Image (cartoon, rainbow, N blue to C red):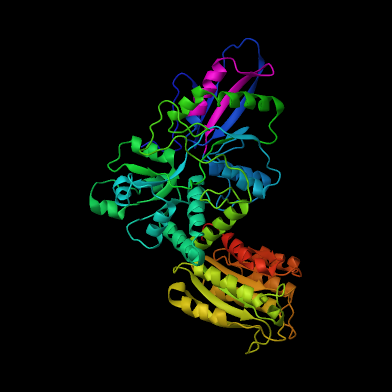
Amino acid sequence: MKLRGAGVIAAAMALVLVSTGVYFGYRQVSRPGCAGEAKLTVAAAAEIAPAIEEAAKSWVDGGAQADGVCVKVEVAAQESVDVAAVVAGKHGVAIAGVGLANGTATMPDVWVPDSSTWLLRLQGKASGFAPSNGKSIARSPVVIAMPEPVAQQIGWPQKKLGWQDLLGQLTTGTAIRPGIVEPTRDAAGLSGLLALGAQAGTLGAQAQAAQTAVLRALAAGKSALRQDLLARFPRSNDPASIAQALSAAPMSEEDVVQYNSDKPPIPLAALYLEPAPISLDYPYAVMPGTDPIKAKAAEGLFRVLTTADFKNQLGAQHLRGADGTWGDGFEAPAGAPSPAGTPQVTASGDTGGSAAGGFDPAVVEATLNTWTAVTLPARMLAVIDISGTMGGKVNGGPTRMQLTQQAATRGLGLFSDDWAVGLWVFSSNLGGGKDYKELVPIQPVSSGRSKLVTQLGAIQPKKGGDTGLYDTILAAYKNVQSGWQSGRVNSIVMLTDGIGNDDPDGGIDHPGLLNELKKIKDEKKPVQLIIIGLGDEVNRGPLDQITKITGGGVFVAKDPAKIGDIFLQAISLRPTTPR
């Protein structure tokens, strides 16, 4: 099977092989009419890199130049997530799930990722990241890939299948074993997750339960790499093997065609569900800071990549043209429409009520935050402020305590049974000379969910209660550290509306707390402290100093009504790899 990341050897051309990428460079031995040389570097998604390489070869061989300067082109096949990590690192921002650059990818002059979602996710975090052009040069619709016998059981190809058919199978049936490539690192996985989430969201009162069920079903079949996911489809005609193998996953049309080109025992069907998920659209992004001559060269190469010849070159790589139609050599899956695919992705605040919607960065962030909260194993102690001010109403409506309870209950509903969660409250003088009280010890959610829900719902603010914040932080840290478990994110999530430590009985002060945390911190047993402050009076400075020692972070919901979103955001930014 040819997998993404594999190169194409051009025998007559110079080839430079560099660790994870295949670089293609072309130079005229002598080229009349131009002088000097401008080397244009292009980093492209592995499946489109051979087509760009072929087009660049023809262009350079034909005398490519920019303002009288000879042009050389080097094309590197690079995974989009790896280049995204380089860009994020350069701009000092963190993109959920992307992590640090791996050391093999470098900043190109032109980047052709598989999806514009990469550009928009980066722009949402890094205001200085403003690439030019950005127009699509190819397209590959995102489909639901299914082994043909499984697809036939649910009516393919005679029946036009919709998202609700699939949702029913995922949330109530047992015949479908779904999977997904980690959507924080894979554009097709993200597209499928957004589409499924949007459709689950149309179910009214059942929306949250359906969304959670979908996320858990997909998480159970999650793969870190596309190759690993493809390897889990059935490799035998044996009914038992088919039943135990992967049976549905959001993937690109190109993935399905490429998979089937290797003549597997069980071919994959491509289900084109409507409304269509966001397609892979391969934007041509000229990186900011590219010098003028290279920018001119980039313009010339872009013109080459919009010709009919290039569409044919795309067809040989199982990709469509930017308009959603295909060129010569494209082997369409059964039932494939032409044209097909959504328009190029652009930022929009209007989801349009469809599976694809627009690309609303806020919706994407919320979806990925929820995904991370559901899929990342954790051992967590929730610590909730019950000081007197938590009884205050927000905009004449619910109290701060009620909003906090709603957010925590929603979060608990997302956590799978393999989480371990405990519950404390804190204020001042809660008995035994302590400012905190344990309601539920940290225990598996599988056995403690009902008790957690009951205790959470019964919490009431303490009239006149103050905020023994620092003593509580130290006690909670020691508690989580003492029962630390490997293979999980061990964390404390504290929700408070206090402006800081307000303990009438004294207790530990801020310098004392910092010193104690430094003493007991164990790099081999990290405990993340996440503090969520409610209201606009939160004094971040001292809290930031605390979390700088422990790890974690401070999140402020200036509007307490937004605490639910802040809670999910805070949970999602835990380390992506449990230590």
**Where does the image place residue 145, in percent across and percent down from the top left?**
39, 46
Left or right of 150, for residue 34: right
Question: Does the image show residue 99?
Answer: yes
Instruction: Write the residue at 76% across / 70% down.
Output: 537
Q: Is residue 57 magenta?
A: yes
State the residue at coordinates (69%, 77%): 469
Residue 40, picture quadrant: top right
Viewer-proximal residue, 391 or 127? 391
Q: Quadrant of the N terminus?
A: top left
> In the shown orientation, is residue 179 left or right of residue 152?
right
Q: Residue furthest front?
A: 159
Q: Is residue 86 above or below residue 42?
A: below
Magenta-colored stretch includes residue 260: no
- Up/down of 99 relative to 334, above or below: below
Q: Nearer the viewer, residue 398 or 39?
A: 398
> In the rendering, at what x and y percent does residue 258 appear?
39, 36
Determine which quarter of the picture holds residue 259: top left
Residue lying furthest left? 238
Residue 44 lies, with reference to residue 278, above or below; the image says above
Question: How many numbered markers are drawn?
Answer: 0
Which residue extends farthest bottom?
Answer: 432
Magenta residues span 51-78
* Location of residue 554 with respect to 470 vertically, above or below: above
**Front residue of 70 and 478:** 70
Q: Return the x and y of residue 360 as percentages of the image width and height.
A: 61, 51
Q: Is residue 487 visible?
A: no
Relative horizontal placement of residue 154, taking residue 32 as reference (left or right): left
**Residue found at x 46% / y 47%:** 274
Q: Position of residue 9 (x, y in %)?
A: 44, 26
